[in-house]
Image (cartoon, rainbow, N blue to C red):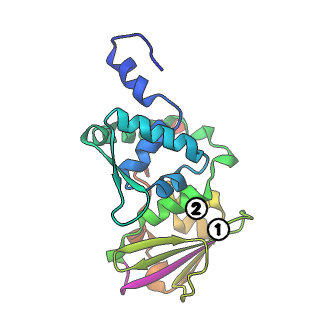
Amino acid sequence: MEYGQFCPIAKANEILGEKWTLLIIRELLIGGCRFNELQRGLSHLSPTLLSKRLRSLELHGLLIKKRIQGQRGYEYYPTDACQQLLPIIKSLGDWGMIWARNNLTDKDYDVELLMLYLKRSIVPNKLPGSSTIIKFNFTDVSQYSHWWIVVNNNDVDLCVKDPGKDVDVYFTTKVKTMVEIWMGEITYKQAIKQQALSIVGYKALTSNVSVWMNNSVFTGLPSATKI
């Protein structure tokens, strides 16, 4: 895609303007480095197109592709040029929270993306002990309605199959409700009061969820209707 203009905005858009490219960069910048991790954060993107976009980003110097030692496959790491996009991506997200959140539809509430973000939001050193099992039950999802976050010391894993360990805290809710909580639209207390959320488990975990599971970096931004 070429615009035939010397404007730096046009030249940047030749690299970044293709569909999915900015979202792939988003995933790289927040820690996704393996193909399946990137795929999980971009579940509607085909593997073929993801491979094509990764090749393009590598060609333009935005990522480094490295073979995984002793294994098949590769890992992808953002270069300095890609890292420089972080404040731009954050500003774009800020704009979206203020001006575009009214465009959300039911199909946008992706449980897989939500759980990936919740996994990344866990703060292991704020959890008691060396191991914690957190289970989510989504009442509005027919496929993959049960998820487990397994924390062992500083390692955090996400499972769709029962890990066979005792659960420390249970969340029962709808995907949309959990998204709204994580994005800062409503609080845990408000959702519980509205009977939209149930949290069961050790009081040390259920009474201070926001301490050990961070909310989105966009929490607190007003919508355009409130400006």
Determine whether the residue tagged by mark 1 lies in a helix, strand or loop. Answer: strand
Dot 2, crowdedness within 10 Å: few (<14), some or many (≥20)?
Answer: many
User: Which residue is the site of mark 1?
Assistant: 173
Give the residue at the far left of this rendering.
80
Q: To which quarter of the image does residue 142 belong?
A: bottom right
Label 2: element kind: helix
Tag 2: residue type? Met
In the image, residue 18 above or below residue 115: above
Depth check: 87 or 73 in front? 73
Q: Is residue 186 left or right of residue 106?
A: left
Magenta portion: prevailing SS class: strand
Image position, residue 23 (x, y; %): 47, 42
Q: Which residues are magenta?
A: 127-137
Give the amino acid at mark 1. Thr
Q: x%, y% of residue 42?
A: 54, 49
Answer whether residue 217 is visible to the viewer in this image. Answer: yes
Report, in whole angstroms, how far the alpha carbon at label 1 lies from the one at label 2: 7 Å
Q: What residue occupies the far bottom of the structure in this picture?
A: 166
Residue at (51% x, 34% y) in the render: 99
The answer to whether residue 92 of the structure is visible from this angle is no
Q: According to the image, label 2 marks what residue?
A: 178
Point 59% across, 51% down: residue: 43
Q: Residue at x 67, y 44 (%)?
A: 105
**Is there a contact, CB below 8 Å, between mark 1 and mark 2?**
yes
Q: In the depicted view, which residue is nearer to us: 168 or 56? A: 56
Q: Is residue 74 magenta?
A: no
